[in-house]
Image (cartoon, coloured by chain):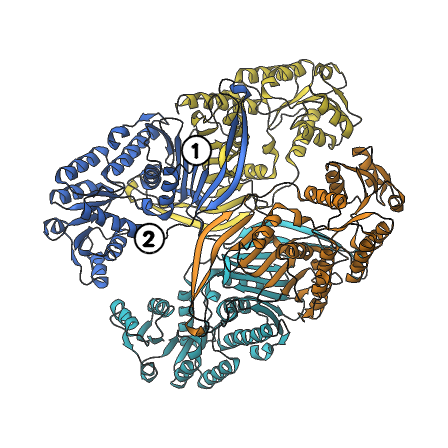
Chain colours: A cyan, B orange, C blue, D yellow
Amino acid sequence: MINIGVIGYGYWGPNLVRNFIEVPGVQVSMVSDFSLERLNKVQERYPKIRVTTNSHDLFADPQIDAIAIATPVSSHFDLALAALKAGKHVLVEKPMTPSSEQAMRLIDEAKRRNLVLMVDHTFVYTGAVQKMRELVANQGLGDIYYYDSVRVNLGLFQHDVNVIWDLAVHDLSMMDYVLQAHPYAVSATGMSHIAGEPENIAYLTLFFAGNLMAHIHVNWLAPVKVRRTLIGGNQKMIVFDDLEPSEKLKVYDKGITLNGSSENLYKMLIGYRTGDMWAPKLEMTEALRVEAQHFISCIEHGKQPITDGEAGLRVVRILEAATESLKKQGRLIELDLAEVAA
Amino acid sequence: MINIGVIGYGYWGPNLVRNFIEVPGVQVSMVSDFSLERLNKVQERYPKIRVTTNSHDLFADPQIDAIAIATPVSSHFDLALAALKAGKHVLVEKPMTPSSEQAMRLIDEAKRRNLVLMVDHTFVYTGAVQKMRELVANQGLGDIYYYDSVRVNLGLFQHDVNVIWDLAVHDLSMMDYVLQAHPYAVSATGMSHIAGEPENIAYLTLFFAGNLMAHIHVNWLAPVKVRRTLIGGNQKMIVFDDLEPSEKLKVYDKGITLNGSSENLYKMLIGYRTGDMWAPKLEMTEALRVEAQHFISCIEHGKQPITDGEAGLRVVRILEAATESLKKQGRLIELDLAEVAA
Amino acid sequence: MINIGVIGYGYWGPNLVRNFIEVPGVQVSMVSDFSLERLNKVQERYPKIRVTTNSHDLFADPQIDAIAIATPVSSHFDLALAALKAGKHVLVEKPMTPSSEQAMRLIDEAKRRNLVLMVDHTFVYTGAVQKMRELVANQGLGDIYYYDSVRVNLGLFQHDVNVIWDLAVHDLSMMDYVLQAHPYAVSATGMSHIAGEPENIAYLTLFFAGNLMAHIHVNWLAPVKVRRTLIGGNQKMIVFDDLEPSEKLKVYDKGITLNGSSENLYKMLIGYRTGDMWAPKLEMTEALRVEAQHFISCIEHGKQPITDGEAGLRVVRILEAATESLKKQGRLIELDLAEVAA
Amino acid sequence: MINIGVIGYGYWGPNLVRNFIEVPGVQVSMVSDFSLERLNKVQERYPKIRVTTNSHDLFADPQIDAIAIATPVSSHFDLALAALKAGKHVLVEKPMTPSSEQAMRLIDEAKRRNLVLMVDHTFVYTGAVQKMRELVANQGLGDIYYYDSVRVNLGLFQHDVNVIWDLAVHDLSMMDYVLQAHPYAVSATGMSHIAGEPENIAYLTLFFAGNLMAHIHVNWLAPVKVRRTLIGGNQKMIVFDDLEPSEKLKVYDKGITLNGSSENLYKMLIGYRTGDMWAPKLEMTEALRVEAQHFISCIEHGKQPITDGEAGLRVVRILEAATESLKKQGRLIELDLAEVAA
């Protein structure tokens, strides 16, 4: 039996509690939150779970094996560090931390203590992203040319982080997993349209070794909601539309063909190839349920999570660099993710 | 009666001939093309039109008042200059010229000779773009925050120009007309995925004075065709989807509301407002027909075309700068369009 | 303070409890269900609500003013009759009863006792249906020509009622309210594809006085989900797509124009008129909440509900007649709804 | 070399000429039409084709082997009969004739003279319909349960035939080919909304042996254009949307599963099965080109066309019966297509 403590019972915490409870061999022992009103909700629905306004009660409880942190990003570092120091495994919301230095510090702490440190990149555990990863890994698309994602809608404006930290974090975490490749630099542009508020629209270009590139468009001020990712390979291409009620993922057997020798480029003939489209059936289990099981399995078997601290760090590093580039109107900012990945 | 000569009878020339013929008071006198096969087609369909393989026959013909040029971009400058020097009004395909210097040279020549110089930015003459211009001009959207356009599909790869010159030219010419504002700088990223070929994917960010920005995404290697423009204003927002069979233009009465004083930003409350959506009926006359009439009308009344040489120059200047920025991975390149606009 | 009792806590009962609780001046006093497990859920979530396995406890409780019945249709008549005899106002699930005779019996009982009898035609209380009613009532569409509705998807097969009683009941109740006109006859076709099971596909045509007709297509065995209603008027037309995430209701300023005299019909010229499309903002309050408030308001002010027993009866009468017609492969079955409406 | 004559150069005739010309071994010799203006167009575009206002010139010309008839339906019988009597093979527009008696008369005449008689059911020759036929024939869908088709839009009202003869003829000809099964009876409903004009909205239900049924919805007065066919099988299901720019045909691996014995029906459990969706690549050759080649091939090799006179007759018989049923508000009208098919 693994005992879990949950810090933060606002928007996401209830989902963590609900999903961890359903994992066999897991017990949610304690929930902490500043708000008594929220803690009342915990007690109403789960009378056996202890509640506290003091997160240190969780660190101090010897029966608690692991702690899930679902608080605002500014508190992630302190809480996660305290949890690790108390010998607890940690699952922390995304973005992992407000800075890459803090993320590295947490990774070090977890390694030294041999504890599991996992970042809650929830979308990675959806059936659609798992299937995209499988297609890319099996060379089902051929060589990958580009990854292009759009995530726009009206609201919800954040006051403390810009739209990159709020929305692009989803795309970056999915891309990190699907491509298993790390960009070496980023160029970002964007703008705030409300005086004094963080940027509400942004465009990120990510450069990879070889001829792979990625682009992410995020916007809090769009008239329509779009959640669409294109992945172009030299053999097949994917359209992932997360708003479709079914057939979210479509694989197109389309591309170009080249005839001619590379010495004689002007005579090279580019042809177009179209074939079947295929929408594979996707696993429909709730992503957070899959993720909760994975976290427990990593604890039980000493495995590295697929969204480990390093994955969290890579995403934070890109968020930092993108925000810097955005301030400088697209100036290229280099990333050192190769080391991170090592 | 105004006599028109047409140079080039490949993809676009036949459309020019067909539309000019239908304008009252216009006669298409002569067509030139290198290809005898194409000229045969002219004669089959329009026995009264004279044909020639030598474009100088058009310049030399005293009866010809105006010349429309529908040849590859590399020949635009020489042909347009010769036509102007021969005293002919000129309608030239987009992009106007391969360089902004050449575009300026043509503008000067036309001005000195008091001739009409018009660039064939066809989409400007569609009902949808005319309606967007009207909505922006009448403050129907409020202050404009952003212009975001996507133009992607599979093919047709060009060998001589990159995807910016091929596809973004449409968006830039539409944006130039709809916004009537000129960006001061551009940052572009992109890539070629076929060795030795021009860039087939590109992303452009355009910076304007105030808090207006624009972004254009063009791609020759996408699995699906997208032609979609979002325009965000602080009162209303537009979605223009050119692939919709009807209701291409939708106006959303959506936006944010601000409560609180600007001194106390952290207390500022951002609310969301949604209202009706409205798809205005659009004028359905073929754009090229409208454009042909406008060209003739400018000649007859000595008016400046709405897509004049200056508009053509501004677009070329952005294409040049975007290509330079793309080579430098997003480096900001300044534009001097204010002077151009003057 | 009005006290409500709820019978049945399966699929729909929890929604009734949740919504009635939020209506000011209302208290949910007691819930009955055969299942102790379900009653436990009531107690967990609402400790103040009394529970019982015997619905007669609700009839016998002098404090209970009104009873909401959310049980299988076969039990509606007995429960509603007992409730009325006990002097309680009644809200009963749709379809109101398995036969029109039973529906008439309930209407009589309620009238004699001066009690409110309301049928839970939930969709009538959605913003979309309210708006459609408003447009039809205000002659916004002109004369109505047809009402055409499609409600198909895969599942859930019922064992005790056919697809008409399960799905067409929604369309019939919406149509009854929107058109405020009553068909005089029905022709229906359909089929069962699973031996021994009720019909899983059906098509209903409803004939009205004048040149109005309606058609409903329902199917439990369709590969895609469709929820779409067209209403054609001689001035405007509506498309209501309930699966759209936003802009569910679209009003098209489209139609035909007639030129010529009616004496000379063969010379009559039919023209086509297209104008703007408009998607009005819809009230988004949960329909059941609106309905619960309406039920309470009818009790407090002695009003007739907009989905009263007569509306329930009209729908049941059509369901009966349609099922009879279906068995006879489309034979026209007359309805006597004019009396019902009186 | 096979010589073709074409009667009628209105809407469809030019497509026949254009496509026959491109079939190897075929020459279009003569075109007849009442209108000199139309004949001038023939001569302008095809100077070698002879023209005449008298269709008898085609019958009398010994060099002409086959005649294609693209005139209003009221003239089909006389023209086709004259052509057959003159020993010409015949391709006639759909609907084949205004009555089934006339269709039978043409079939007899062609048989006796050993001539090819083919009906221009163009959609049968599209890649989509060919693929649907292949899927049904190969048992790719399992047992077929239903065929449901919707063909609605605004306009074009016909004065001489109702919407069934104008639009449903397409669905009936496609269905006849795809299912290769013949309905034994039809029930139809519909209405005219314009005094003195034919019915502009209609719904047809077709009954087949076993548990197969079909339904067709046609409407000249709809605010949106729909061209959608569902085919439900017990193993897979098809959605064919002819308005999609690509992936017009989608095959869903969806259906129900049955557990339990047929003796104990109430205990039978119906489960739902969902799998991949697949959009096969479709042959994109213009349907009329494929059809023209097929007609020529039938002439050259003495084959029976896949849309032969019997197919044309079956469609006409259903159109007749459906119109009769419509007048009688859905009364079931029996068909004797089994004999026709023999």
Residue D143 percent location from the top left of the image: 46, 38
Residue C286, label in figure: 2
User: Which image quarter: residue C116?
Assistant: top left
Q: Quadrant of the N terminus of chain D?
A: top right
Does C126 appear above or below D146? below
Residue C103 percent location from the top left of the image: 21, 36
Residue at position x 55%, y 55% from top? B139
Q: Are marks 2 and 1 in contact (CB under 8 Å)?
A: no
The residue that label 1 is drawn on is D212
Does B86 appear above or below D131? below
Q: Is residue A265 left or right of residue C181?
A: right
From this viewpoint, is residue C200 visible?
A: no
Question: Type of residue at label 2?
Answer: Glu
Does C89 appear above or below A202? above
Residue nearer the viewer, D22 or C193: D22
Question: Type of residue at label 1?
Answer: Leu
Separation of marks 2 and 1 at Cα, in angstroms:
40 Å
Residue B195 percent location from the top left of the image: 74, 63
Residue at position x 55%, y 19% from top? D98
**Callout 1: 10 Å neighbours few (<14), some, many (20+)?**
many
Chain letter of mark 2 equals C
**Callout 2: 10 Å neighbours few (<14), some, many (20+)?**
some
Q: How many marks?
A: 2
Q: Is residue D299 left or right of residue C316?
A: right
Residue nearer the viewer, C265 or C30: C265
From this viewpoint, is residue D305 visible?
A: yes
Nearest to viewer (mark 2 / mark 1): 2
User: Which image quarter: residue D76?
Assistant: top right
